[in-house]
Image (cartoon, rainbow, N blue to C red):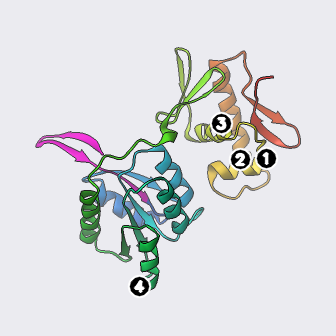
Amino acid sequence: MIWSSKEKGVRQVARVLLIEDNNDIQEILYSLLSEEHEVLQAFSGTEGLRLFQQEAIDLVLLDIMLPGKNGDQVLEEIRLQSQVPVIMMTALGDKHLISQYLLAGANDYIVKPFNLDEVAARVTVQLRNNNTPAQEPPSSKKLTFKNLVLNPETFELESGEQTLRLGKKEFQIFETLLAHPKKIFTKEELYEAVWEEVYLPGDNTLNAQLSNLRKKIAQLDPNEDYIETVWGLGVRLKGDK
């Protein structure tokens, strides 16, 4: 948990990860929970896992039906890494299904449509029962390649005394390439890994973001190549010869 200074003294503020693809529910829960906590929002299972791995999270509110990875998969992967409290959200009041999620590692569940006071109470109870600071995840560490350092906490690219801030998609592209330094990514693979949606042939969005990323890298280290195009195949990090 993080410490926040308030007029009535210093108190702990939990960092809650809200994984829900419905915009209306996101808005309602964000308004409710952000009065007392720091709330991070994810609109797909894949995005939620990425945030969980990058941030120190104290509690997860997890919808079951999600684009990308569904709630079952997200819960399974969270439990491989952490025992942070997870509250499942479902529109299905099936007792057998709810029992399955509890046995799979969920700490609690909320059935939609829900009562906001009940949601707030269940979040408070889980945080009270797990009153230990969240551990910083390994992926929050800086990533180094050649003469560049990528800071996942600030989206900044560093080289010596120089620093440039990357856009979100520029950062995600470079981070994805760094995670697989020898892999050649096709346009489709890289686009779908970063945007988490189906790639449509002819879409120039990825090319534009790659161009911007290359320009920023060149500003920091003009004498070194970092991303190369493998004609007919895709792009990859350019290793040392």
Seen from the viewer's position, the closer of residues 219 and 59 is 59
Task: Name the residue carrying label 4.
Answer: 95
Marks 3 and 1 sit apart, C-alpha to C-alpha, by: 15 Å
Horizontal side, residue 221 vs residue 31: left or right: right
Eye-nearest disc, 1 or 4 = 4
- N-term mark: 3 or 2: 3
Q: Of the residues tagged 3 and 2, which is closer to the observer?
A: 3
Question: Which of marks 4 and 1 precedes in the sequence?
Answer: 4
10 Å crowding of disc 4: few (<14), some (14-19), many (20+): few
Residue 186 is labelled as 1
Q: Mark 3 or mark 4, which has the lower sequence index?
A: 4
Give the percent coordinates (x, y) of residue 161.
52, 14
Label 1–label 2 contact, CB within 8 A: yes
Q: How many angstroms separate mark 4 from mark 2 (CA)?
A: 40 Å
Residue located beneath label 3 in the image:
178
Residue appearing at x 63%, y 20% in the figure: 147
